Amino acid sequence: MPSTEPEVLLIDAGNTRVKGALYSRGRILPLFSLKTAKVLRRGELPYLNFPNTIAASVVPQVTEIIKRVYPGALLISSNLKLPFRISYRGELGADRIANIAGGLKYSNSFIVVSCGTATVIDIVKEKEFVGGYILPGVETMAKELYKKGALLPEVKLEELTLKPGNSTKECIKSGISLATAGAIESVKNLYPFPLFITGGLGKKVAEVIGGNFLKWLTFEGILEIWKTERGEFTPQ
């Protein structure tokens, strides 16, 4: 029997990339992934004619593009009905809200790490957002060291390693890996909860420190917020 569940366009707009996916027949299907700089330069997003759209955007200029291309889109913020409790001074980022909502599909208490331009570590205890940490992402660290260090080489982080380096490039890679892994391990020692890792660089980080790499966690959270806002879903 054909599914009567509505199709939903999910948009995740970050500092590095703007990604879109379709939720249809119980599945999340990736549709596009564009560099944020390109979207800003062109001032456009692909228009896809689906009945429902919800977006998590942390780039104000991209948010305005989403509003123009998808005027009926639901924009994620702490003002929406959410499946978890928040006590936070200021506006919690839409991506962090989505990742927390996605994590609730798997546990009521957890640590979620998003690895992109920044590495963001958030803690949830019994469906309540406890707080978080924001540090430079692994590629951001590499770029800044190259930019600020006159004799430091440019490093491409194809993989992360905790092994001590035997060259300047290797030492930079190992140092960035150690800094990121050490931060996450410190949080794990404070909060011994399940660890969920996502983001464009999440797989590389998960390979070094372990944890569950959940590629589509942000999209899963965006979808759950859409369902919660409509009163269709409440996490167990």
Image (spheres, rainbow, N blue to C red):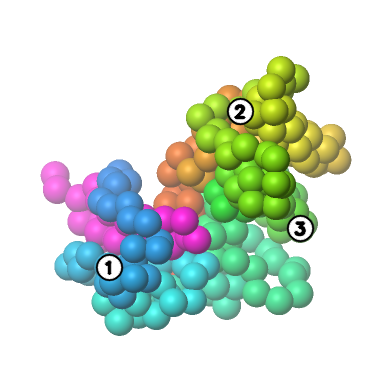
Q: CA distance from mark 3 to mark 1?
A: 33 Å
Residue 24 sits inside the magenta stretch: yes
Q: What whole-number distance in Å separates the C-alpha atoms at marks 1 and 2?
A: 33 Å
Circle 3 or circle 2, nearest the eye: 2
Query: In terms of sequence position, does the residue under pointer 1 or pointer 2 come before the other?
Result: 1
Q: Does 120 appear in magenta?
A: no
- Quarter of the image with the N terminus is top left
Q: Residue at x 39, y 80 (%)?
A: 64
The reply to whether residue 84 is in sight is: yes
Q: Is residue 159 above or below residue 147?
A: above
In terms of sequence position, does the residue under pointer 3 or pointer 2 come before the other?
Answer: 3
| Amino acid type of the residue that numbered disc 3 sits on in the rendered structure | Gly
Residue identified by numbered label 3:
131
Q: Is residue 176 left or right of residue 62?
A: right
Helix, strand or loop at disc 3? strand
Where residue 164 sits, quadrant-wise, is: top right
Residue placed under numbered mark 2 in the picture = 160
